[in-house]
Image (cartoon, rainbow, N blue to C red):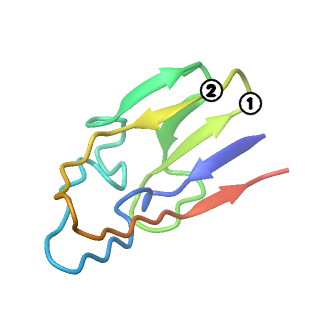
Amino acid sequence: MKTLLSSTLLLIGLAWPAAAIPVTNPGFETGNFAGWTQFGDAGFTGVDGNRVHSGSFAAYFGNGSPGGISQDLATTIGQTYQISFWLTQEG
């Protein structure tokens, strides 16, 4: 079973009242996790062109030990931010 985070992961419909948060490689359009830090069990993770929501690539996270990706984002104290992503889960 793979859980897919679409190519729109974390760019992702970002709607900011004032300033945009620069997210590196938000849709995985580099074809890899460039700009993201992988943690935990990365044995069942990757980027490919299967089951894409938009763009050409999607990240996937399958069964195995818990793991994921992260990225530090520069924000401003007191500013409101909305972050969203597209997710599909099989099985």
Q: Secondary structure at mark 2?
A: loop
Residue beneath the point at 43% across and 26% down: 38
73 sits to left or right of 65: left
Q: According to the image, label 2 marks what residue? A: 44
Q: Are marks 2 and 1 in contact (CB under 8 Å)?
A: yes
Question: Where is residue 68 shown, x and y percent of the image?
Answer: 53, 33
Return the residue nearer the eye: 63 or 76: 76
Q: Is residue 88 left or right of residue 35?
A: right
Q: Residue at x 33, y 35 (%)?
A: 36
Check disc 1 and give the amino acid type: Asn
- In the displayed structure image, the side of residue 91 where residue 14 appears, left or right: left
Q: Nearest the camera: 88 or 17?
A: 17
Q: How many marks?
A: 2
| Residue 15 x/y as whole percent | 31, 77
How dense is the environment of label 1, judged by Cα within 10 Å: few (below 14), some, or many (20 and up)? Answer: few
Q: In the image, which disc is placed on residue 82?
A: none
Nearest to the observer: residue 21 or residue 30: 21
Looking at the image, residue 3 lies above or below residue 55:
above
Furthest toward the front, the residue is 78
Residue lying at the far bottom in this picture: please name it. 17
The residue at which mark 1 appears reads as 63
Which amino acid type corresponds to the residue marked 2 in the rendered image?
Phe
User: Mark 1 falls on what kind of element?
Assistant: loop
As drawn, 24 above or below 55: above
Q: Mark 2 or mark 1, which has the lower sequence index?
A: 2
Residue 76 occupies quadrant: bottom left
